[in-house]
Amino acid sequence: MAAMDEAAAPGGFRAHLEGLRFLAFGRAVPAALFALLGYRVLSNLLNRIATLPHHATPLDILAGPLPTALYFLFCTIPVGIYLVRPRPQARDGRLVARAAAFGGTTMLLVVGAFPSPALFTPPELVRGAATPLTLVAFSLAVYGLLYLRRNLSIIPEPRRLVMNGPYRVVRHPLYTAEIIAATAVVISYPALWSVVTLLPFMGVQLLRARFEERLLARTFPQYRDYARRTWKVVPLVW
């Protein structure tokens, strides 16, 4: 009996370490990251509310605090998701997949939460197009998060195949929303960081989608059929 316990001990110890690692890096660290960014966005949101006219119109709210409020939800909903999500069924642990995942997430969140001075002031007509784009982007992002729920992950980690809500139409609605949001940021406030990183950001998001689809196809037999009847990123286009 003692020999069996000694043989089982290394496996039990490794399982314990793996559990601690998941709690730290699979839950606590990403939850803390999004909470920090959410706190920063909340500060921006409160400033926008404070600068509203005394008799604010619906247009003032649409152009001011509402997009920031949706962005705040986009940052804070993942906090709860990461704290309760289960372990994945599989994981793409390659360095290139992890680098693309964290790079793409950091680019958008940092640009939105920590803006830098604008390079120039776009025409009012051009800037006006940014508001509806931003509203569409973060509405779609929040909608996608509400359906993705505990299946959310930064790196490719399939837990369950989600095919409802926006996922009935496109396979990567969060990436679609993030690309629209990044474009809106450049249109409304062309700061150096956002302009320089826009095209690389799009490329990284599409690379992430490719890595995720490869892992999902290996994990879920029904994924290939789902992929044939849905659009990848842009409905009716791609």
Image: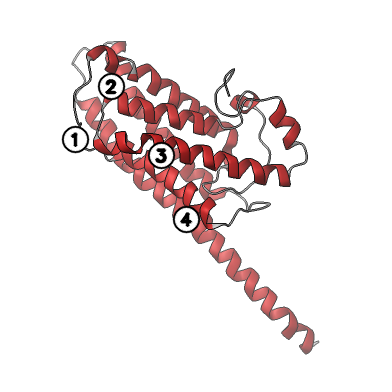
Mark closer to the chain start, 3 or 2? 2
- Residue at mark 2: 64
Residue 56 visible in the shown view: no
Mark closer to the chain start, 2 or 1? 2
Q: What numbered label is drawn on residue 10?
A: none
- Percent of width and height locating residue 211: 59, 45
Q: Is residue 87 left or right of residue 57?
A: right
Q: Secondary structure at mark 1?
A: loop
- What's under tag 4, amino acid-wise? Ala
Question: Where 2 falls versus 106 (above or below)?
Answer: below
Front residue of this view, candidates 35 and 215: 215
- What's under tag 1, amino acid-wise? Pro
Residue 192 visible in the shown view: yes
- Spatial distance from mark 2 to mark 1, Cα to Cα? 19 Å
- Percent of width and height locating residue 226: 72, 30
The residue sitting at the bottom extreme is 2
- Residue at mark 3: 200
- Residue at mark 1: 117
Q: Secondary structure at mark 3?
A: helix
Q: What numbered label is drawn on residue 28?
A: 4
Residue at horizontal 31 percent and vertical 28 percent from the top: 186
